[in-house]
Image (spheres, rainbow, N blue to C red):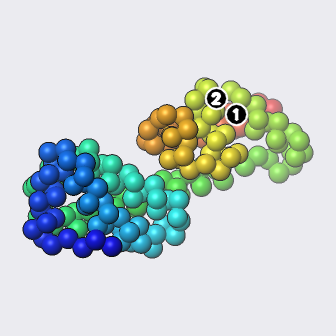
């Protein structure tokens, strides 16, 4: 693990702010393991940890012009990561609650329940359907789906959220009219 002196860190931050990818790489290597351990303690999920660490560093790169103004990069980094992890945990809890609300009537036969869910999935727009199936049926993470479909992770998350909402609405309306 690379440990940076305050002077080295400040110099790397200034170089990164100017677009120096090698300097950014050094910052990444100096912090990513400790940051990953910190995030894992919050999420208890290796895939979530990977996704959050990646997202945090991508956001830092995208806002690199502001780095010279940061007085304590470590505090800045860990605060951003903690906030991102909490948002991730809240969103995951909302998705679990949404999935629980998607449960089909217990009195329905398994084949009938499966057919109703399949019909709901088939009614989704193509991209939402792809994201939903890759996540739910193949178990891919948002980052893996983004890479496979050439989308951003945020776009994948949005498609997943919209797909779940549409499926829930379909199943609720289907129960009421069926």
Distance Cα–Cα, label 1 vs label 2:
5 Å
Q: Is residue 19 above or below residue 169?
A: below
* One can see residue 11 in this view: yes
Q: Residue at x 68, y 46 (%)?
A: 138
- Coordinates of residue 75 in the picture (x, y in percent): 22, 68
Q: Is label 1 in contact with label 2 (beta carbons under 8 Å)?
A: yes
Check the picture and name the quadrant holding the C terminus: top right
Q: Residue at x 46, y 59 (%)?
A: 50
Q: Residue at x 89, y 41 (%)?
A: 111
Label 1: which secondary element: helix
Q: Camera-side residue: 20 or 88?
A: 20
Which residue in the structure is indicated by mark 1?
A: 121
Which residue in the structure is indicated by mark 2?
A: 124
- Coordinates of residue 127 in the picture (x, y in percent): 58, 29
Label 2: which secondary element: loop
| Mark 1 residue crowding within 10 angstroms, few (<14) / some (14–19) / many (20+) | many
């Amino acid at each position: 693990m690379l440990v940076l002196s305050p002077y080295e860190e400040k110099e790397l931050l200034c170089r990164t702010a100017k677009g120096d990818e090698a300097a950014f790489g050094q910052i990444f290597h100096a912090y990513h393991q400790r940051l990953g351990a910190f995030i894992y303690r919050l999420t208890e999920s290796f895939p979530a940890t990977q996704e959050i660490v990646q997202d945090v560093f991508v956001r830092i790169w995208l806002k690199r012009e502001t780095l010279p103004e940061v007085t304590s990069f470590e505090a800045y980094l860990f605060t951003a990561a903690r906030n991102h992890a909490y948002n991730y945990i809240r969103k995951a809890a909302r998705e679990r609650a949404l999935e629980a609300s998607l449960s089909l009537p217990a009195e329905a036969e398994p084949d009938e329940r499966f057919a109703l869910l399949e019909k709901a999935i088939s009614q989704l727009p193509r991209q939402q359907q792809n994201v939903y199936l890759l996540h739910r049926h193949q178990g891919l993470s948002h980052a893996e789906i983004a890479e496979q479909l050439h989308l951003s992770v945020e776009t994948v998350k949005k498609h997943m959220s919209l797909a779940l909402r549409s499926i829930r609405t379909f199943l609720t309306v289907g129960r009421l009219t069926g």
